[in-house]
Image (spheres, rainbow, N blue to C red):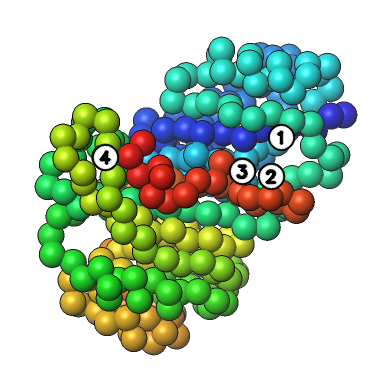
Amino acid sequence: MRNIKLTLAYDGTDFSGWQIQPGQATVQGTLAEVIAKLTRSQPTIYGAGRTDAGVHAAGQVANFKTESSLPPEEFLRACNALLPPSIRVIASEEAAPDFHARWNALAKTYRYRIFRTREVPPFIWRYVHQDSSPLDFVAMAEAARRFEGEHDFTTFAASTGSEEDDRERVTTRTIYRSELVRCMEQSSGVQAPHEEWVYVVRGKSFLRYMVRIIVGTLVDVGRGKLNPADIPALLALRDRSKSGPTMPPQGLCMAGVEYEKSAEPAGHEDACSTASQ
């Protein structure tokens, strides 16, 4: 039995997230249908992370086991021939038999893009959250750094939808990098440079809506509703009602996933160099 590892990029706008859901178009479900055609079997597709509805990926990683003799490069070619244009396989390789896209991940990097100009170009509106209101970047950047380290992120996580699951879930997470970056970019079709603020977060794993709630809290800091010094107290409260709103999904992108012996995250790109996509 062979183990095939795929690195994927996708526009999540028209999908109900990564995970297969009955009667819904999902990235995992769409990919599974294509793999089934190529292998003439029904392999289980494992993803490094379960991106939510409307969330994008530049470096999602998946794996599946198969008895097919197709070489990895043929999986890449054939998948891209059958998948919709909104999903692309950008790398394919044969992995060790025990490799698992989710359980072997050492870290994941996400970025959230806030477009600061009033008018969003039609070429990027699917991939940014627009907010041109007055915001204190310095305060937001200082607050962002307060999330680094190991913390209980109950205050910054949505419910699973089940009281029993909420009681049993582990809410402690380790964040290696939490940074707000200011970018001046010249996007295709934009006559003048525009400003974007990109929140970049790197951690071992994340709770449901955690990144989007952190960004919503940073925006509250930018508006003066909270101070950077409030973040440690909010973490200690373990009370979701005390943090900021859940930001819209389109600004969020899974930038990459890191594994042992990898020099950098699969699909990882510099925050500012990709802001004009």
Q: Position of residue 232 (x, y in %)?
A: 42, 84
Q: Nearer the viewer, residue 91 or 38?
A: 91
Among the two numbered marks 2 and 4 on one chain, the one whose residue lies closer to the N terminus? 2
Q: What residue is pinned by disc 2?
A: 101
Residue in the picture at 49% in, 27% down: 87
Which of pointers 4 and 1 indicates the residue nearer the eye?
A: 4
Query: What is the three-letter code of the residue carrying label 4?
Result: Gln
Which residue lies under the disc numbered 3? 266
Q: Amino acid at mark 2?
A: Ala
The picture quadrant where one finds residue 126 is top left
Gap between marks 2 and 4 measured at Cα: 35 Å
Element at label 1: strand
Residue 82 shows in the view: yes
Q: Residues within 10 Å of mark 3 (few under 14, many from 20)?
A: many
Q: Secondary structure at mark 4?
A: loop
Residue 208 as seen in the image, left or right of residue 13? right
Q: In the rendered image, which residue does mark 4 sit on?
A: 186
Q: Residues within 10 Å of mark 4 (few under 14, many from 20)?
A: some
Mark 4 vs 1: CB contact within 8 A: no
Which of disc 1 and disc 2 is earlier in sequence? 1
Residue drawn at (43%, 78%) of the image? 146
Question: What residue lies at 56% left-to-right and 68% top-to-bottom?
Answer: 176
- Image position of 258 with respect to 153: above or below: above
Figure check: 28 above or below 239: above
Marks 2/1: CA–CA distance: 8 Å
Q: CA distance from mark 3 to mark 4?
A: 26 Å
